[in-house]
Structures are given as structure tokens and as C-alpha cells.
Image: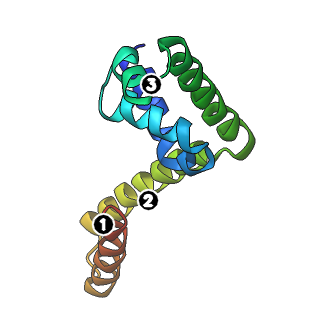
């Protein structure tokens, strides 16, 4: 599995992990979060490697299906890009403006935007 795929599954898990079965959650957390091998997870749950693999793949497939249906990750990404564009535009306007009141308001807006990242 490539790094991008792992990052994608992790992001999907952050959004939709609570919708998975308890076993799927545990397997995905151990595999992706704790970086345990299929064998190590199989030993932990006293099941076969194939059982772990199936649980892992079903969980990952469910996460993809949730994203296809709900699109929350894509909406989040679009919102982040829009906020970055707005932030850049505010910085440019503030740099070009001579109006102290406007600059103060723009700085206040930037503070609100910065708080979104915390």
C-alpha cells in the first residue's frame, strides 16, 4: 500500500471510523495507527491472517463507500481550499490598503480564520 493510500484511509477513518463495526475499528487502528502486521493483529484477536485481511479490506471498502455517499472529506477539502484563498485575498487587500479601519477589520477576520486551524 502506497503512502497516499495509507493517508487516504487514515483521513477517511477520521471522518467515518465510528460508522464501522467495533472489530473493523480495532483492526484498522492496529494496522494503520499502530503499524502492526496482519500476523500480529491475527495473534492479538486469535484469528487467521486471512480473517484480519478480510476485516481490514471490508473496513477500508466501507470507508470508501461512506465517502462516495456522503462526500464529507471532499467537502472538507474544498472548504479548506476556499479558506486559504480567502485568507490570501485578505492579506493582499490589507497590504494594499491605506484605510486603518479596513485593515483592522481584515486582521480580525484573519484571526478568526487562524482560530479554525487550532
- Quarter holding the C terminus is bottom left
Q: Nearer the viewer, residue 37 or 47?
A: 47
Q: Residue at x 50, y 40 (%)?
A: 25
Earlier in the chain: of badge 2 and badge 1, it is: 2
Q: Residue at x 61, y 43 (%)?
A: 21
Above or below, comparing residue 25 to residue 3 in the picture: below
Mark 2–mark 1 distance (CA, rounded to whole Å): 12 Å
Q: Is residue 9 left or right of residue 32?
A: right
**Element carrying mark 2:** helix
- CB of mark 2 within 8 Å of CB of mark 3? no
Earlier in the chain: of badge 1 and badge 3, it is: 3
Q: Residue at x 37, y 15 (%)?
A: 39
Q: Residue at x 30, y 66 (%)?
A: 114
Residue 78 visible from this viewpoint: no
Read off the residue under disc 2: 86
Earlier in the chain: of badge 2 and badge 3, it is: 3
Read off the residue under disc 1: 114
**Element carrying mark 3:** loop
Read off the residue under disc 3: 46
Q: Position of residue 37 (x, y in %)?
A: 34, 18
- CB of mark 2 within 8 Å of CB of mark 1? no
Where residue 24 sits, quadrant-wise, is top right
Q: Position of residue 92 (x, y in %)?
A: 31, 59
Depth check, mark 2 against mark 1: the one in front is 1
Q: Position of residue 42 (x, y in %)?
A: 42, 21
**Element carrying mark 1:** helix
Amino acid at each position: 500500500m502506497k503512502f497516499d493510500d495509507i493517508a487516504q484511509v487514515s483521513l477517511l477513518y477520521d471522518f467515518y471510523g465510528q460508522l464501522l463495526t467495533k472489530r473493523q475499528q480495532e483492526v484498522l487502528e492496529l494496522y494503520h495507527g499502530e503499524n502492526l502486521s496482519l500476523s500480529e493483529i491475527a495473534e492479538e484477536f486469535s484469528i487467521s491472517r486471512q480473517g484480519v485481511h478480510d476485516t481490514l479490506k471490508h473496513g477500508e471498502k466501507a470507508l470508501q463507500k461512506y465517502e462516495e455517499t456522503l462526500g464529507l472529506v471532499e467537502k472538507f477539502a474544498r472548504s479548506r481550499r476556499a479558506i486559504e484563498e480567502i485568507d490570501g485575498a485578505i492579506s493582499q487587500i490589507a497590504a494594499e490598503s491605506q484605510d486603518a479601519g479596513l485593515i483592522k477589520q481584515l486582521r480580525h477576520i484573519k484571526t478568526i480564520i487562524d482560530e479554525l486551524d487550532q
